[in-house]
Image: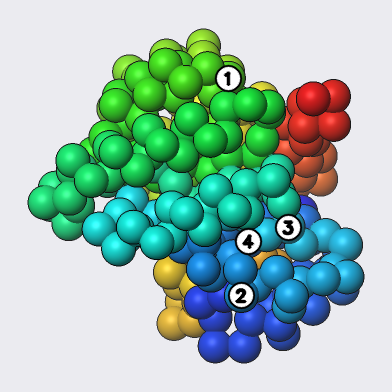
Amino acid sequence: MIDVHCHIDQYRDPLSIVKESENKGIITVCQTNLPSHFQIGMRHLVGFKKTRLALGLHPLLASKSSAEIRLFENYIGMTSYIGEIGLDFSREGKSTKGCQLDIFKKILQLINDRPRFISVHSRSAEAEVLHLLSDNKIKTSVFHWYTGPIDLISDIVKKGHYFSVNHQMIKTNTGRKILENIPPDKLLTETDGPHIKIGQRPAVPADIALLEKYISSMWGISSEEASNKIKANFFNIINLLKTS
């Protein structure tokens, strides 16, 4: 199983989640919201084989990023995994729109030197994110928890990008419609744990199995076939990193 967007550092006991995922053979990409969180997390994840730590700067934290962007520059050479980065022009992020744009453009300039595994946040700013990725020659990224227009999905796919989907999306008609419009070869799975809940508890990487069950039914194939397809999609991106 693959969980490409999980905030391990925000669980009550992060290492227990990592150990459980490693024992179950789950590949987990751990997103960070600030470079200082990446700095802290590095030493805790040394030695784990299936857990990757991503370097991020969340758009809703852009106003706190004067020192953080310098840290981002310092650590950019230490990982091929980037996230969570992007733009958020929803009501929550509208007041920092200008700052977000400045930071996102700066980050894209820093990471466009070679292929990387990039997880992007695009809430209420999907077209802007796609435009800036193209402007900065970012040919492959993963749109995390896409909530934008259905008709923009084909444009995102044509540019070579992927989508990571989660349990919350299968709970709403809009979310399910988005899933149905994502081509199978462009779909990845995520939990966005611990922010998303399964019942009354935070989602964990092992819960990807529940998501795969839904996806397999949607695609009309077995859960094993769906899991293998999603894994192949993930390694299509990883192979780009290896050849750079």
Q: Is residue 76 visible?
A: yes
Q: Are marks 3 and 4 in contact (CB under 8 Å)?
A: yes
Mark 1, residue position: 139
For the residues labelled 2 and 3, the Cα–Cα distance comes to 14 Å
First in sequence: mark 1 or mark 2?
2
Q: Are marks 1 and 3 in contact (CB under 8 Å)?
A: no
Q: Give the Cα distance between marks 4 and 2.
A: 13 Å
Q: CA distance from mark 3 to mark 4?
A: 6 Å
State which quadrant residue 183 falls in: top right
Residue 117, image quadrant: top right
**Helix, strand, or loop for circle 2?**
helix
Residue 46 at x, y percent in the picture: 82, 71
Across and down, in percent, residue 242 comes to 85, 31
Q: Is residue 170 visible?
A: no
Q: Amino acid at mark 3?
A: Arg
Identify the element where label 3 is drawn. strand
Marks 1 and 4, the one that precedes in the sequence? 4
- Amino acid type, callout 4: Cys
Of tags 4 and 2, which is closer to the observer? 2
Q: x, y (%) of residue 236?
A: 77, 28
Residue 200 is left or right of residue 218, and the answer is left
Give the amino acid type for the residue marked by disc 1 in the picture. Answer: Lys
Question: Would you call the spot at circle 2 few (<14 residues within 10 Å), some (14-19), or many (20 or more)?
Answer: few
Q: Which residue, given by chain and number where applicable, does mark 4 sit on? A: 30
Secondary structure type for disc 4: strand
Report the number of discs.
Answer: 4
| Dot placed on the residue nearer the N-terminal end, 2 or 3 | 2
Which numbered disc flags the more N-terminal residue, 4 or 2?
4
Camera-side mark, 1 or 2: 2
- Say which label, 1 or 3, has the lower sequence index: 3
Q: Is residue 98 left or right of residue 120?
A: left
